[in-house]
Amino acid sequence: MASGRHHSLGWGALNAYGLLFLLFLYAPLALIFVYSFNSNSINMAVWSGFTFDWYRTLFGMQPADTTSIFAAFTETPDHIFKVVRNSLVVALSASAISTVIGTATALATARYQFFGKRAYQALLLLPMIMPDIVLGIALLIFFVGAGFTMSLLTIIIGHCTFLSCYVYVIVTARLANMDTTLEKASADLGAGPWTTFRKITLPLIMPGVLGGFLLAFIISLDDVVITYFIAGVDTQTLPLFILAMMRRGIRPQINALAVLLIAFSFIVASAGLYLRSRRN
């Protein structure tokens, strides 16, 4: 009886800990979601009623409140759509390029032995460990010294420098658990290296490649520090846009934008899990 009681108490404590951990993670997100519908345009922390006005304002379905203390800083929907387009162009381009680079690098380090391989693998992890502000300053110095004009291209190149490392780690983990006998059988049956890669290797590592792409996409979409240093004047991304809005004052539209960004990230992650299950 005593052991059964202790067993049930242990499971109860574990369940309570799990619940508290989830609350710790998601309570701030829940508050953002709730207060994105707060009608109070002056103090977001004081609930004054339910409204969709901030979402309507973002999509141009309702004119901005000219009596608000933030009326002088209200951005047009066209500006918001331009910022969102910039973020999607950067995230898609950087994640696609990083996926190719990271996957190729993972295959090279997994299949071949060469001098300095250990040091090379350690250097590949350095951009992930390095503080973002250090990497941002280094990229800024490089682009200025090389004569680049700050634009979407510099943001894409800058993101590729560290996103490739994330893809490399995920694909490497997938390759470590992959059975190579199918590749050897393919070669024994007369298939060339490209045919073996296209029909055997790539389908086997596709979950890792897809996971690396989605992780790179989300990280690129949310990046602030590095993008801040290498973005041009007319190449603002969504995180930089939200940061600029917060500097002018905490406005209710910020909560609405944050909720839309969270929802989009959730959709991307869900799509990745679905495609991965279909692939398996």
Image: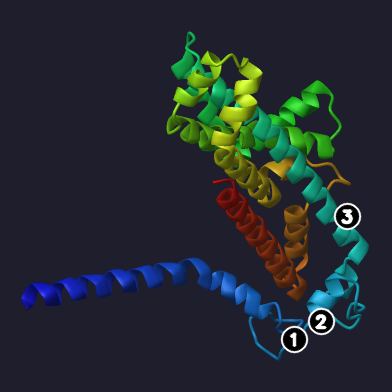
Residue to which mark 3 is pinned: 82
Residue to which mark 1 is pinned: 39
* Residue at image coords 77%, 82%: 41
Mark sitting earlier along the chain (3/2): 2
* Residue at image coords 58%, 70%: 29
Mark sitting earlier along the chain (2/1): 1
Which kind of residue does numbered mark 1 sit on? Ser
| Badge 1 element | loop
Tell whether 15 sits left or right of 267. left
Tell whether 56 sits left or right of 276. right
| Badge 2 element | helix
State how far apart marks 3 and 1 are (Cα): 26 Å
The vertical placement of 47 against 145, above or below, is below
Q: Position of residue 122 (x, y in %)?
A: 47, 24
State how far apart marks 3 and 2 are (Cα): 21 Å
Question: To which quarter of the image does residue 212 belong?
Answer: top right
Mark sitting earlier along the chain (3/1): 1
Q: From this viewpoint, which residue is outermost toward the top?
A: 115
Residue to which mark 2 is pinned: 53
Question: To which quarter of the image does residue 257 belong?
Answer: bottom right
State how far apart marks 2 and 1 are (Cα): 8 Å
